[in-house]
Image (cartoon, helix red, strand yellow):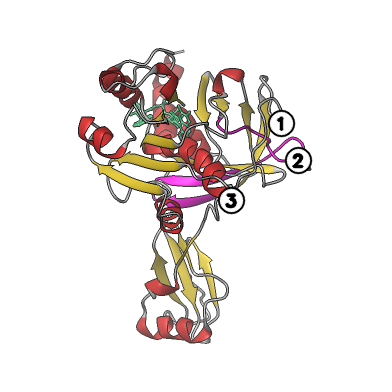
Amino acid sequence: MHHLRRQAPRALRTITRRLASARAEPQFLHLAPSGDFWLGSKIYAAKHNPSDYVRSLPLPVGQIIPDDCPHEALIKMYDAKEVDAEQLRPAWSAGDPTAAVVPPGLCQLTDEFTDCMLEERTWVTDDSFVVRFGLPDATKPLNLSTCACILAGHKDDVRPYTPISTNALTGSFELLVKAYPNGALSQRLATMEVDEAMPFKHIKFNVKTQYPFSAKKVGMLAGGTGITPMLQALHAMLGSPDDETEVSLVYGSKTSEGILARDVLHEWEAENFWRFKVSHVLGGVIGEDHVKRHMPPPEEDCVLFVCGPDLMYNALCGPRGDPEVTGLLKKLGYAKSQVYKF
Ligand SMILES: Cc1cc2nc3c(=O)[nH]c(=O)nc-3n(C[C@H](O)[C@H](O)[C@H](O)COP(=O)(O)OP(=O)(O)OC[C@H]3O[C@@H](n4cnc5c(N)ncnc54)[C@H](O)[C@@H]3O)c2cc1C
């Protein structure tokens, strides 16, 4: 008994340390003088070759050298011992906005937890990643309505996640996740092995307003991982050819490196500049000035979508679970029918 008491805390500390360090491993471009290349996470070493025969150049997290990189560019990188930033591509992309909208009630996941197998994890920054999970019926898409999210469960913890893949994807779905150092679910998602199972379910509470959103203007207030429900709504709006909704997004992140889905947002904004505007708030909270400057005013035909950390809900519109709208948005005159807490 005494022995156990002494051992348990140490074992726990080891597990906690391993989990707390779940970040992207450094990745390398391994290049031979011929221009042959491969990507890997460890420095290349082979006894039979001189030490710098294969050069191992560090790659920025979330970036890869695509297979069609020109041969001359690869030789140049070998000679210069440096990666040419122009040849880099994001390891993951959301692609074009895609409206693959289905009505509520068709989701493959029910209100009972069902195991889904992890198929792949791609780190996109040093603490965020995209995970792809296989669906129980591999012949069908997830069929989640827009807007809605699913729930992931691990031990006694259950958390909502909004897939960033659309129903155009058959047999699997993708989540963009930020790994919090002591986060129960996000660390499990960051450290579980491929082919391990994660239980997911879908309940009615998590079906929110449905596309089309029946307002001329949509304002989005997102913080951190709260961007994923906005991406889901943007897929539907920007991906529908006849949709003319004007969308403005205010997106709060701690640092500029921490902006999730940054490339996606920039691309989609550039392609839809006449109706989609993104404003970033870095290192601070979304406040009255941001709302007044960037959100459609309450007297216009508009709805506002809110998603972010608890503190953000509390300050902007009141707690997520409370159907009433309080906080800043109430003060500024937005009605309950105009504000959606995702
Ligand atoms: C509708 C909805 C959709 C969501 N979709 C996604 C998604 O697609 N991807 C995703 O990664 N997350 C998403 N989230 C957030 C997600 O549900 C979890 O809250 C998040 O993964 C943290 O859970 P955890 O168990 O890892 O951390 P917890 O165990 O709950 O928290 C551990 C510690 O992590 C820190 N932390 C946790 N959450 C936050 C936060 N939001 N901001 C700052 N610090 C925090 C705190 O320090 C906290 O003490 C969504 C939330 C909502 C409401």
User: Which residue shows up at 55% across the image and 50% down it?
Assistant: 97
Whichever of callouts 1 and 3 sits on the residue coming sooner in the sequence is 1
The percent coordinates of residue 71 (x first, y second) are 52, 84
Which mark is drawn over residue 108? 1
Whichever of callouts 1 and 2 sits on the residue coming sooner in the sequence is 1
Quadrant of the rendered structure where residue 173 is?
A: top right
Residue holding disc 3: 241
Q: CA distance from mark 2 to mark 3?
A: 24 Å
User: Which residue shows up at 39% across the image and 21% down it?
Assistant: 6
User: Which residue shows up at 41% across the image and 80% down it?
Assistant: 77
Is 243 placed above or below 68 here? above
The percent coordinates of residue 89 (x first, y second) are 47, 65
* 321 in the magenta segment: no
Q: Amino acid at mark 2?
A: Lys
Q: CA distance from mark 1 to mark 3?
A: 27 Å
Q: Are marks 1 and 2 in contact (CB under 8 Å)?
A: yes
Give SS at disc 2.
loop
User: Which residue shows up at 27% across the image and 46% down it?
Assistant: 255
Which one is closest to the eye, mark 2 or mark 3?
Answer: 3
Give SS at disc 1.
loop
Query: From which residue to which does the magenta span run?
Result: 121-147
Residue holding disc 2: 140
| Ligand 1 under 8 Å from disc 3 Cβ | no
| Ligand 1 under 8 Å from disc 2 Cβ | no
Is 92 placed above or below 226 here? below
